[in-house]
Amino acid sequence: MWSSITPFLHGFGAGAGLIIAIGAQNAHVLRVGLLGRHVALTVGTCIAIDVIAIAAGVAGMGALIQGQPWLLAIARWGGAAFLAWYGLGALRRALRPDGALAAGLGAPGAGPTARQALAAVLAVSLLNPHMYLDTVVLLGALGGQQPAGQQLRFTLGATTASTLWFLTLGLGARRLAPWFARPVAWRCLDAGIAVVMFSIALFLAFTPLHSTP
């Protein structure tokens, strides 16, 4: 019994370790959850993208990327640039006296349309090379090391962790909304996001990614 569930647990732990961290995608879901607009659409899109990316990585795409130095270079420098750009946007919001989106919290009729919300989550997910590095390359490499008969269980474990995380983050964030009724709370959140984004960007920039022969 344990031999059959162990790959699932390995996948769940690896997925949780890589996904449950503040990144551009998670920061976006958190903000959407706090605002309470198009949460289901945003969360569902993130889950679908992660499931496809993890499955593709375990199926061999992760190994393919690892074997191509130029693809790793794109993931490294593209990810660093994207995170720095996202962090700069958060820093600009943090420096605004009104706390950026705080004034629109809970206001009926305000905020993006469903199409705009979908475009935003697709952009922050699919245009973010750091997301591919985590889900496709790293999780794919870990899953690819599993015996052939256990790779599916590993994938199910990793995608389960991703699903539970995005559901918790998106749907649970609304409980924190009362804390963000003041602009200063939004400014603190954006300042924290900016620091983390810049830190990850610097880590990627100064940490070489080695390809596999």
Image (cartoon, grey):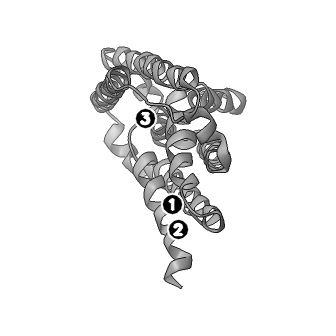
Numbered mark located on residue 7 in the image:
2
Q: Return the residue nearer the eye: 212 or 191.
A: 212
Distance from the alpha carbon under mark 2 to that under mark 3: 26 Å
Q: Is residue 213 above or below residue 147?
A: above
The quadrant of the rendering that contains the N terminus is bottom right
Q: Amino acid at mark 2?
A: Pro
Asked if the residue at tag 3 contacts the one at tag 2, i.e. Cβ–Cβ closer than 8 Å, the answer is no
Residue displayed at 54% across by 27% down: 129
Q: Where's residue 2, x and y in %? A: 49, 81
* Residue on which disc 1 sits: 11
Residue lying farthest to the bottom in this orientation = 1
Q: Amino acid at mark 3?
A: Gly
Q: Residues within 10 Å of mark 3 (few under 14, many from 20)?
A: many
Which is more N-terminal, label 3 or label 2? 2
Q: Return the residue nearer the eye: 149 or 106.
A: 149
Dot 2: what SS?
A: helix
Q: Where's residue 145, x and y in %? A: 53, 55
Residue lying farthest to the right in this orientation = 115
* Residue on which disc 3 sits: 23
Distance from the alpha carbon under mark 1 to that under mark 2: 6 Å
Q: Amino acid at mark 1?
A: Gly
Residue lying farthest to the front in this orientation = 213
Residue displayed at 62% across by 50% down: 58
Residue displayed at 38% across by 38% down: 22
